[in-house]
Image: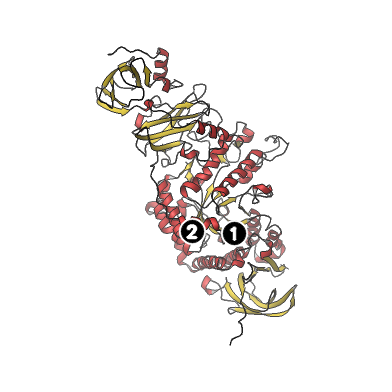
Amino acid sequence: MTQILDRAPESDVAQIVAGRHPNPFAVLGPHACDGGVVVRAFAPGARSLVAHFAEGERFALGARGAEGFFEGFCPGKPAFAAYRLIAENEGGAWDWDDPYRFGPILGEMDDHLLVEGAHHELYRRLGAHALTHEGVSGVHFSVWAPHASRVSVVGDFNGWDGRRHVLRKRIDSGLWEIFIPGLRDGALYKYEILSASGDLMPLKADPFGQQAQLRPSTASSAPRESPFAWTDAAYLAARAKRDPRRAPISIYEVHLGSWRRGDGNRFLTYDELADSLIPYALSQGFTHLELLPISEHPLDASWGYQPIGLFAPTSRFGDPEGFKRFVDRAHAEGVGVILDWVPAHFPTDEHGLAWFDGEPLYEHADPQRGFHPDWNTAIYDFGRREVANFLAVNALYWFEIFHIDGLRVDAVASMLYLDYSRREGEWTPNQYGGKENLEAIAFLQRVNSLVYERYPGALMIAEESTSWPGVSQPVHAGGLGFGFKWNMGWMNDTLRYVSQDPVHRRWSHDQLTFGLLYAFAENFILPISHDEVVHGKGSLVGKMPGDEWRRFANARAYYAFMWAHPGKKLLFMGQDFGQTSEWSETRSLDWHLLQFWPHAGLSRLVRDLNEVYRAYPALHARDCEAEGFEWLVVDDHDNSVFAWLRRGGAGDPPIAVVVNFTPVPRHGYRIPLPAPGRWKEILNTDSNYYGGGGLGNFGEVRAQAGPCGGLPASALVTAPPLGAIYLLLEPEAGPTN
């Protein structure tokens, strides 16, 4: 063997072999010396090792002990010369390109932007990415672990041996990286981390991993890096010009794993869902699908609300390319896609973010701010710039990479209040002595601003259950910057009302009218969500009193009340056809019920409500403006009748709505109206077509001039039992020649 000019110190060799060296790039790989280069490598199990250079020369590397550390002098070779390593033992020979001969991929700008919390495309730099580096194809791995004393990437490709591929640490930022040449996409991997004190942590999934194994396995997967042929440019351009507040928005909320199941109760794939769910939503007239969280999560029973892989579409339904095809297909049909997003907290599964590098990193170090007692989960440290940036970048990622149309942000109230679900003494006030989480507020304002700046026409929706002011007001006006807020108060009040026997409703009349006192304080969405049909609450039809006819009539009247009420609409799957059993994530919806008349009728009504809602601006254009609503009959407690007017823009005909929440038909019921003439009955929930009794107004009513209730005209109408009617003012025919 050629005399080695620069031998590694024994301490370095021992640390490399033990997997304890803090900077293996300073020891392994090529190192220039007088007359050539010294090559050092760690090859456990090898009996001999040769460096084979691109020009054909081969240089044997000598073993330093029996643990797999080799080094050798290669005369005349520069440090940048390409070579492969060839190992032999009694079992045969194998070769590989030395990862320690490659320079870094990340740069000083990555360090700076990460530390500043301003790296808005961090998902393109961290995680696993198949790419070509210094002329060689492979996979680049990078992870943030500032407290770690060593980070390795492990997988089948190195026998899950954390000594084999130890990453280079970037001191200024706490980022670690390595390029592994020749590694295939799809390779399974995790990070093996030593804490600052040298303790070996449980293997960690990649926080920026864009693909993951199917549960119960928990490894990340190096994704295929190939351009996707999107076909939705025209859709996105039209979306950018649309004002969502003035557009019809009717959302079908869906849990992909239980909308339908395949043979043997298997999950449908993203492509199968594209072939079935999207046409169904389109045929029912919904404008958007809202998917319960699809970020990778370990527990089916969490419905996705305890995610581990924020950047990975769950592999339950296929790969990321499959989800892209799903979104592209939806856009081709004019259907938007909204994702439920969970930046409030994360589960403490050992392969996840909790104590990621041996210390609190993603979670707040103070348990009073970093642990959620209700859900037994960790709370993000919103005041740490790197963590806030991680979450903000994740929001941008779904818009940029998957072309989604909106995010519904889960559990916003738990983020806003330091005392959320905590007793006195269990929370620490902010710097001003208040209970507001100032860091979380700043985070929400920032992420909303970023999304609306980059993706005009997008939807940012808050599930916020308190009276926090300005949730859907712009950031520059002091608001949180969301576009819409779920109206949880409306949902609770109205469901309590319709759950009562009609004989008692006269005493709860204000449960339906109270919401109009604040209906325009925010841009509201009226949600009948999954939360209302689980945990013993039963189905929506099951909440209604009476026999089957009354339950379905109540449901039809309630839906008509909801669709004509100011605010955008959201309905959870199964409630569109009156599923009678409580929702379960473990099985398909009860689609067989559609063969029975009450269920088929309710499904038809939902379809027609969406059609009318979308067709007439009076029902949607001023959902968020008080000028679009006027009470006609507000205080008829005894008869439990409500009537109001909806208006659109100039030139849009108004629509009068009458709802009777008793089983007693109201004949000759007078309502005030803004104009005399013909008012066409465009919807009647008691129609035989929907399973009702067929009582109505023979297609129209005639309003007569004369003051009534402060308006210049009135009409006598028939309000069907447990029913609702929509009346559209028809333009008077002009003179004919």
**Which is more toward the observer, 100 or 257?**
100
Disc on res. 702 = none
**Percent coordinates x, y for residue 700 in the rendering:** 60, 78
Amino acid type assigned to the residue bearing label 2 in the image:
Val
Residue 362 lies in quadrant: top right
Mark 2, secondary structure of its residue: loop
Q: Dot 2, how many residues are within 10 Å of its Cα: few (below 14), some (14-19), or many (20+)?
A: many
Q: Is residue 15 above or below residue 693?
A: above
Mark 1 crowd level (few <14, some 14–19, many ≥20, 10 Å Cα): many
- Dot 1 falls on a residue whose secondary structure is strand
Q: Quadrant of the C terminus?
A: bottom right
The residue located at (58%, 80%) in the rendering is: 698
- The residue labelled by disc 1 is 568
Q: Quadrant of residue 716?
A: bottom right
Q: Cα distance, mark 1 to mark 2? A: 15 Å
Residue 456 position in % (x across, y down): 55, 52
Q: Residue at x 41, y 38 (%)?
A: 129
Q: Is residue 23 left or right of residue 474?
A: left
Residue underneath mark 2: 335
Which residue occupies 35% across, 34% down? 135
Q: Is residue 298 left or right of residue 565?
A: left
Residue type at mark 1 is Lys
